Amino acid sequence: MTQATFTGVLDLAAGAFLLAAVLIVWRRELRAMVRMLAWQGAALATIPLAVGIYQADAALIIVGVIVLLLRAVVLPLLLARAVGTEDHERRESTPLVNTTTSLLITAVLTVLAYAVTRPIIALDPSPATRAVPAAFAVILIAVFIMVSRRRALSQAVGFMMLDNGIAATAFLITSGVPLIVELGASLDVLFAVLVLGLLTGHMRRTFGDTDLDQLRELRD
Amino acid sequence: MTTTIDASPAAPALGEGPRAARRSIDGPALSGGLTAILGAIGLTLGLSVIFGEPRQLRIGWLLPLVGVRLDLDPLGGVFVAATGAVAIAVGIYAVGYARREHWARFPLVTLPLFVAAMLLVPAAGSVTTFLLAWELMAATSLILVLSEHRRKEVRCAGVFYAIMTQLGFVFILIALVVLSATGGGDAFTTIAANVDNLTPGPRNAIFLLTVLGFGSKAGLLPLHAWLPKAHPEAPSPVSALMSAAMVNMGIYGIIRIDLQLLGPGPHWWGLTLMIFGAVSAVFGVLQASVSTDLKQLLAYSTTENMGLITLALGAAALLTSSGAPTVAAIALTAALLHLLSHAAFKTLGFLAAGSVLAATGLRDLDKLGGLARRMPVTTVMFGIAALGASGLPLGAGFVSEWLLLQSLIHAPHDSITLVALAMPLSVGAVALTTGLGIAAMVKAFGVGFLARPRSAAAEAAREAPKSMLAGMTLAAAACVIFAVAPALLSPALQRVLAVLPTVGGDSAGPQIDTILRLPGVAGSMSPALLAAALAIAVLLAFVLARWGGRHRPPVMVTPLWASGADSLSPRMQYTATSFAEPLQRVFDDILRPDTNVEVTHFAESQYLVERVSYRTLMVDPVEQRFYTPVVRAVTIWAQLVRRAHTGSVHLYLAYGAAGLLIVLLVAR
C-alpha cells in the first residue's frame, strides 16, 4: 500500500464514520439506526486494518478483524434482536429536540471538534492524526444523541457510538492499540450492551414502555 | 445449610438437579473450615517468619504499574500469627453458628475472604499493596456486618461503619501518598532508606493523618463511634474477627508507619499517642460499665483496650525520645503482649456472647441471667474472657497491664518535665481504667450469667452445639496461656522487639520467664506462681471446709425470707442498669444519660406510690457533640445539591455533556 492510497483509505474511512453518525442523528427508525451503526462499525474497523496493512503489523490486523466482527456484526445483531422483540416501538417517540435542530447542533459539534483537536494535530501532523477531528466529532454527536433521545434502545445506540468514537480516536492518535487493551474495551462494550438489553426488558415490564422519562418516578 | 430453599413451585424438572447438588454441599462447614485453614496458614507463616528469615513475594502483573509486593518481617509476622489464631477459633465456631443461624450464602463466602484480606494487610510491603489489602478488608467486613440486612438497625450500623471506615481510609490514603511521594518510592524498604530526607512539615502531617486514620480503625476517640454500633449488629463470629483481629490492624499501622518508618519522632508524637490512648481507654471503659447490651459492652471494652495499647506505644515512643530505652522496651512489650492477650480474650468474649445470643436471641443484660445452670460451658468461657478483660491476676490481660504500669511507674522522673508530668497522670488513667473495667466485667458476668433468668427466653436457653464450644475452648486455652505461662511467648516477643529499634526495641527487654524480671528496674512477678498459690489456697479452703463441715448440724429447708412480700421474683434481682447506677451518677457530667423518672401516686393519697417508671437512654456523648453538627451540615448541603437532581436521565446526561464541553474548551 502506497502512502497516497493509505491516506485516501484512512480519510474515506473517517468520512464514512462521521457520515454514519450524522445519518443516525437524522433517522428516527430504530432498525435503520442499528443498520447505520453496523456501517459505522465497519468504517471503524477499516482504520486499524489500513494502518496494519500499511505498517505490516499482524497484531493490528488481528485487532481490526476482531473490531469488524464485534462492532459491525455481533453488537448490531444483538441490538437488532432487542428492537425486534418490541413491535410498537420501532420508532423513536416524540423527540426532545426536532430533527432540523438536531442536524444543526450536529454541525456545530463537528466544527467544535475540529476546533478543539487542533493542538493534537499540531503535535504530530500525519494522515492519521488529521482524521482525529472526525472521530472526535462522533464522540460529541454520540453524547448529544444520548441527551436527546427518549427510548432506552436509542440510548444503547448512542452509547455504542460513543464507544466507537473513543476507539477510533485511540486508533488514530496512537496508531496501534495493544491487543489486550482493545480486547478489554470490546468486552466492556459487549457487557454494556447485554446489560442495557436486560434493563430495557425490565423497564418495559415495569412501566410498559421504554421511555427514559418514566425513570423520573424512581426519584423519591 | 445455605439458604437455597426456593419456594416457587414452578419448573421442578429444571431446578431439581442443581438444587439437590447444591444442598449436598455443607456451606457452613466449608466456609468455617476454609476460614480455620486460612487461619492455620497465617499462624504457621507468622511463626515461621518470627523465628526464621523474612519472606518476600512479588506478583508483578496483579496490579497495574507497580504490582503486588508482600514483605513479611517479624513485626508483620506477629500480626499475621495473631489474626490466624483468631481465625482458627472463629472458623471452627462459625461452623456451628452459621448452621444454627441459617446464614445466607453471601456471608458464608465472604467470611474466608475477610480473613484472607486481614492476613494480607500486615504482609504488605508497599504502599499500594497495603492500601489494596486495607480496602479489601474494609469492604469484606462491611459485607459481613450487613449479613442480617433485613433489620433496620443493622442497615443503620452498616451505613455508619461504611462512612467511618472510608473517612479513615481517606486520611490514610492522603498520608501514605504524601509518604511515598516524599520518600521516593512505593515500597516500604525504599521509603525507610530515604526517610531521613523528610522535612518536619510533611513528617508531622503524615503522623497526624495516620494516627487519625489508623485510630479510626482501632476504635480510638474521636473516630470510635462505628465500633459500638457495628460490632453488636454484626453476627458474633464476625464481631469476634473484627474486634479481636481487625482493630489490631489500626495498631499495626501506627507501629509500622509512625513508629518504625517515620520514627523516632519528637516528644510530642509520643505524648499525642498517650493522650489519644488514655482518653480512649477511660472513655471506652466508662461507656462499657454503663452499657446494658452485652455485645456493645464488649465493643466499648475494645476501645478501652486499644486505648491502653496506644498509651503503651506512646509511652514507649516518649521514653525512647527522652533517653530511657530500657523502660521504653518494657512499655513496648506491654503493648504487644496486651494486643495479643486482648485478641485472645476478646475472641472468647464475643464467641460466648454469640452463643448466648444464638440460644436466647437476647443481648440485653437486663433480660438475661440464670445461664450458669443452662449453659455451663459458655458461662465458664465467658468467665475466663471477663477475667482476662478485667486485668486481674490469673486473667489474660493481667501480665501486660502489670508491665504497662511498671514501665509508667519506673520512668525516669528527673530528666524531662514532660515525662515527669505525663507518666503519673497515665498511671492514674490506667488505674481508673482497670478499676472500671472490673466493674464492667463483673456486671456482664454476674448479671448476665448468674442468678435467676429474667425473661422466658433466658429460661429456655440451651447449651451451644459442639463446634461452637470447640472454637471457644481454643480461645480459652490461649487466654490461660497468657494468664499463667506468658513465658511461652517470650522468644517470639524478643524477635519482634529486635526489629523496632526506634522505640527502644533493641535494648534488653523484660525477661519473661516463670518469674518476670525487669532489667534495671526493681520489679518482678510470677503469674505461674500466683496461679499455683491460688490453686493451693482454694484446695486448702475446700479441704478445711469439708473437714469443718462434719461437725455442723444437718441442713434444714425453710421458706426464704422475702422482706414480708409473698415471694421473691426474678424482677427483684440486681439488673445491669441498677448495678451501673452509682457509676452513672458519679460520671454524670461525662456520660450525660437521658434519664426520666415518673412517679404515679394513688388518687386517694399522694404519700402512697402506685407506680414508678424509670427510663434511661445512654447516648454516646462524643457522638452527640461532634457528629451531630457534622451530619446536619452534610444534610443541608445534600439538600442543596439535590435540587439539581430532578430524576430526568436526559438532564443528567446533559450535565455530563456540558461538563465535557467546558473541559474541552478550557483545556485547549
Image (cartoon, coloured by chain):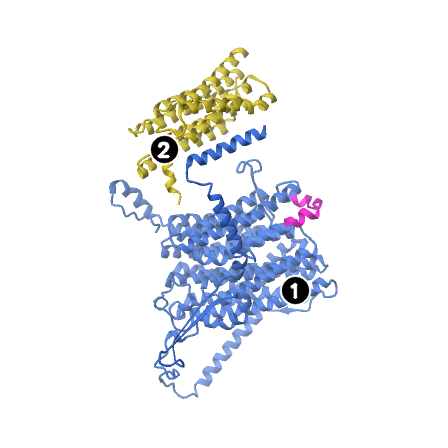
Chain colours: A yellow, B blue
Please identify the quadrant where the C terminus of chain B is shown: top right
Q: Position of residue B377 (x, y in %)?
A: 42, 66
The residue pinned by badge 2 equals A197
Horizontally, is A86 left or right of B171 in the view?
left
Horizontally, is A183 left or right of B253 in the view?
left
Please state which of residues B520 and B177 is positioned toward the viewer in this rendering. Answer: B177
Q: Position of residue B469 (x, y in %)?
A: 42, 61
Query: The residue under label 2 is which amino acid type?
Result: Gly
Q: Secondary structure at mark 2?
A: helix
What is the number of callouts on the image? 2
Q: Position of residue A199 (x, y in %)?
A: 36, 36
Label disc, if present, on residue B621 of the rendered structure: none
Query: Do callouts 1 and 2 mark residues in contact (Cβ within 8 Å)?
Result: no
Horizontally, is B455 left or right of A118 in the view?
left
Tell me which residue sits at (61%, 46%) in the image. B175
Tell me which residue sits at (54%, 38%) in the image. B63
Q: Is residue B541 visible?
A: yes
Q: Chain of mark 2?
A: A
The residue pinned by badge 1 equals B407
Please state which of residues B348 and B353 is positioned toward the viewer in this rendering. Answer: B353
